Amino acid sequence: MAKLYVQAVPPVDMNKNTEWFMYPGVWTTYILILFFSWLIFLSVLGCNPGTAWTIVNLVHFAITYHFFHWKKGTPFSDDQGIYNSLTWWEQIDNGKQLTRNRKFLTVVPVVLYLIASHTTDYRHPMLFLNTVAVIVLVIAKLPNMHKVRIFGINAGR
Amino acid sequence: MVRLPYVTALTTLFSYGLLFAFGQMRDLFRKLIDWSKSKGKDLKGYAPICLGLEDFYTRRLYLRIQDCFSRPIASAPDAWIDVVERKSNDHNKTLHRTSNTTKCLNLGSYNYLGFAAADEYCTPLVIESLKKYSASTCSVRVDGGTTNLHTELEELVARFVGKPAAILFGMGYVTNSAIIPALMGKGGLIISDSLNHNSIVNGARGSGAAVRVFQHNSPSHLEEVLREQIAEGQPRTHRPWKKIIVIVEGIYSMEGELCNLPEIIAVCKKYKAYTYLDEAHSIGAVGKSGRGVCELLGVDTADVDIMMGTFTKSFGSCGGYIAASKEIIQYLKHTCPAHLYATSMSPPAVQQVISAIKVILGEDGSNRGAQKLARIRENSNFFRSELQKMGFEVLGDNDSPVMPIMLYNPAKIPAFSRECLRRNVAVVTVAFPATPLLLARARICISASHTREDLMKGLEVISKVGDLVGIKYFPVEPPKHVEQDKKTL
């Protein structure tokens, strides 16, 4: 089987917290992680596929909201705190809106929502939770929400 | 340009994700446990020294493989080196030195021409100057710290590099981070290569000028950035920039590749920007007579406005220099804080550089300089071609003595480093943040004092460890045998 090679062009992004997102293979890894976590939930909990997708959607909501839209700054001190008031979402692509990466990351929660609600047949408690998750995530990723802190939540330090 | 198998990219991202997840979980548990334990009340009211998020990388990723970095050595960094063994009782959080040393093949030191150990011409002269001038001038250059050794070296460096005048500094890092603020100020524009060294980044940040970055080694992107910036002018006022300087390096130490100097100089001349060339790794190591990338690539030294270099790599000493026109050097001598307030270079170190340059130029009466230059070129080309034949991904151009071997996965970094040390080969592995996150590598530096047997031993060990660790990403070239009686059907 021939090995598939990709070129890794070093991006011009100076922010080391976000430049890893510009390398090849990131989107595929993201999708594969979601798929394999669905399989794991399905095998560990022994529930039906729809519930497993709902759990994947909600866990994905919790993790991505915390790391993309809540935690601010960078995990290393080399950049002397330039990005200390920006969340990861506000830092990627140097703050430019509507780039390919941002569009991809906005589409993923919507697709997850569609899969989760389809496989649970739009039944009640799961539908409500899934809808709340997708609404919060998509609103947080809109370009108008760049650097907006509603009611001052998460504005400090 | 780095090529990697797609599956490797996926697994590397996944491994970093896993390490990140584990680190976050441990942090979460630490926060919970610390909340329940009573906190020390004497620090109430003081701000924390660092926010909990900032040192995440150091605490959760770097400390786990700490034994691969900062290894203490117990001898001069020659072709063979004594590495001190260290033990840890708490999974690498703290390391303790033992009194055992192991003699290892040194593939990590920047000892390009072999001047790091005792040399038959340099060392007696250095010891003599130590006795005459003592170990330190105990003074600043402008007060009492300029000995005749310093003036001799400044003239010699200017002659060697091919510029009218030069100025010396006691430390290589400081040369960049103190000169760039002296040359550029607010209203200026610094355009630097995206993979420039941290000293240049620090100097650029400290200068107050605006900084823009262009894609590594790409004159077309540099032209694009220059055109955009010259057309727009300063950020809010749109006034023209006071001056524009483009900073590039001769050999990039993490990639081992040469700069695209002729095209970049052509672009800079077209748009009337100044050029600053950092030859830390290339001076003395490349070029027919060791004069650096300008000689190797056929660029006239009058076209580069400021040439910077260090004495730590090829000359076996410490310190740095700037070579430029007489007016610039005179200006720097009056304004640069590293010249006005920092202690001058130590006299024996100056004498070491003088003797090393004389050996390279052949002025000591022998042809050892030319032999060393030929040997380092042969050694580098041999080593690089052998590694590529074995299937490793090796970066760097031909003739460059720096060759990074790509590792990619975070787990392979400590595996490669520890396995090599077990087989008595000392290599330097580099991970984030010195390199981009996914492109971790082991960096090999070849020296003129490596003999053919040393290189063969190094190749054998690296090949075996490469098989164990799984970094032969490219297909292995079969060894050529003489074809006998090949029957054609």
Image (spheres, coloured by chain):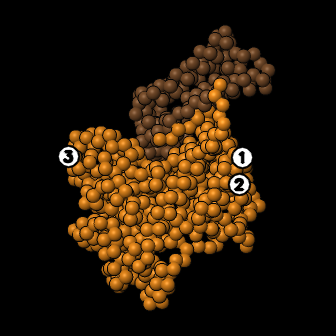
Chain colours: A brown, B orange
User: Which residue lies most toward the top here?
Assistant: A121
Question: What separation in Å lies between label 3 and label 2 (alpha carbons)?
Answer: 58 Å
In the image, is B201 to the left or to the right of B465? left
Question: What separation in Å lies between label 2 and label 1 (alpha carbons)?
Answer: 9 Å
Using the image, name the chain to which the residue with label 1 belongs: B
Residue shown at the point (28%, 60%) measured from the top left:
B301
- Write down the residue under mark 3: B239
Q: Provide residue B382's location: percent of width, then percent of height.
A: 54, 54
- Write down the residue under mark 1: B468
Q: Provide residue B318's location: percent of width, then percent of height.
A: 46, 72
User: Which residue lies most toward the bottom here?
Assistant: B132
Circle 2 residues within 10 Å: few <14, some 14–19, many ≥20: some
Front-most of residues B21 and A65: B21
Q: Quadrant of residue B249?
A: bottom left
Look at label 2 and name its amino acid.
Glu
Q: Are marks 2 and 1 on the same chain?
A: yes
Residue shown at the point (46%, 84%) measured from the top left:
B125
Say if residue B281 shows up in the picture. Answer: yes
Front-most of residues B156 and A12: B156
Q: Describe the element under mark 2 as helix, strand or loop.
A: helix
Q: Describe the element under mark 1 as helix, strand or loop.
A: helix
Q: Describe the element under mark 3 as helix, strand or loop.
A: loop
Q: Quadrant of residue B21?
A: top right
Look at label 1 and name its amino acid.
Leu
- Ranked by sequence position, the earlier of labels 2 and 1 is 2
Look at label 3 and name its amino acid.
Arg
Are discs 2 and 1 less than 8 Å apart at CB? Answer: yes
Using the image, name the chain to which the residue with label 3 belongs: B
Q: Which mark is residue B419?
A: 2
Using the image, name the chain to which the residue with label 2 belongs: B
Q: Which mark is residue A10?
A: none
